[in-house]
Amino acid sequence: MTALVLGHKNPDTDSIVSALSATNLYRGRGIDVKAVAQGTPAPETAFVLERFNLTAPEVCHSVAGQEVYLVDYSDLAQAPDDFAQCKLLGIIDHHKLGDVTSDSPVEVTIKPVGCSNTVIKELHDYYNVEINPSLAGAMLCAILSDTVLFKSPTCTEADKKAAYDLAKIAGVEDLQALGMEMFKAKSNLAGATPRDLIFRDFKDFDMSGTKVGIGQLELVSLSLITPELKAQLQDELNKVKAEGRHSALLVVTDIMEEGSELLMCSDDEQKIAKALNTTVSDKMWMPGVMSRKKQVVPNLEQAFKA
Ligand code: MG
Ligand code: MG
Ligand code: MG
């Protein structure tokens, strides 16, 4: 049986490129796999795939009866709804350990680094599997995206090493220039509805039994969010919250200013604001906050535990 290599819901660049790069890794080890994704590429990912001549993985929302490798997550909330009916074979990730489980032994590599593709690059080295230049270019972009051009507090020396090794394979000389091109593609808001923008990079979390949804929008400048668009995003967040969540958050990150503005609709706005070291107001600016994984989710989980 051909096993599936599958990233998370609302796939980001790392999630989609990880499906491709982990497929290259497993195939290089003689394992029969195919890359799939829970959605089509967002603008940033579309830019990366086009830039390096790669095809997006086939879209897949159901894994019942399949063998599955997960990349870039291990949370049930981010897996296909029928995940309980598949056979989990392995996980490659860089997030907190999630709540998936298995009925037989699995191969798991999870490391506290900035990007799943850093882990996948290290595994290629370990198993001595070759990476072609176009795949290397896409893996490099995934690292630049997840680490926000190495500026995110999630970025480690291992991420930088992997990125520079991949740049060499891909023939990329100016990493910053490539990264800025990519973030400009990501900052293109044209044609997207407020709902599209909230769900472009959105994750639901189960925080001690409470459902909290958190979207992140990374932009080259916050000025792209006009007062009119901000009001529309706020209206849409109210709807997203009403769909069965305690809180719906949108973290709008300014990658040049290195901070984020928080938009939210919540049953307890004070609690959320306090957990994120800000106060409820018209402009909730969080200086230095770039990473949902490291600077937003853990604080909220702690607040909901209390
Ligand atoms: Mg991801
Ligand atoms: Mg990632
Ligand atoms: Mg990200």
Image (tube, rainbow, N blue to C red):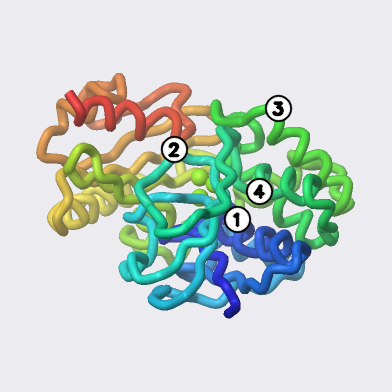
Ligand 2 within 8 Å, label 4 CB: yes
Instruction: Residue under label 1, please give it.
Output: 185
Q: Position of residue 97 (x, y in %)?
A: 43, 40
Mark 4–mark 3 contact, CB under 8 Å? no
- Secondary structure type for disc 2: loop
Instruction: Residue under label 3, please give it.
Output: 157
Instruction: Residue under label 2, please give it.
Output: 96
Real-space CA distance between mark 1 and mark 2, rounded to the nearest whole angstrom: 29 Å
Q: Nearer the viewer, mark 3 or mark 1?
A: 3
Q: Which amino acid lies under the numbered mark 2 shown in the image of this protein?
A: Lys
Of the numbered discs 3 and 1, the one sitting upstream in the chain is: 3
Residue 180 quadrant:
top right
Of the numbered discs 3 and 2, the one sitting upstream in the chain is: 2
Mark 4–mark 1 contact, CB under 8 Å? no
- Secondary structure type for disc 1: helix
Viewer-nearest residue: 102 or 119:
102
Q: Residues within 10 Å of mark 3 (few under 14, many from 20)?
A: few
Q: Nearer the viewer, mark 1 or mark 2?
A: 2
Which quadrant does the N terminus fall into? bottom right
Real-space CA distance between mark 4 and mark 3, rounded to the nearest whole angstrom: 14 Å
Residue under the point 44% across and 50% down: 74
Question: Which mark identifies residue 117?
Answer: 4
Q: Which amino acid lies under the numbered mark 1 shown in the image of this protein?
A: Ala
Real-space CA distance between mark 4 and mark 2, rounded to the nearest whole angstrom: 16 Å
Of the numbered discs 4 and 2, the one sitting upstream in the chain is: 2
In this rendering, is residue 255 above or below 72? Answer: above
Of the numbered discs 4 and 1, the one sitting upstream in the chain is: 4
- Secondary structure type for disc 4: helix
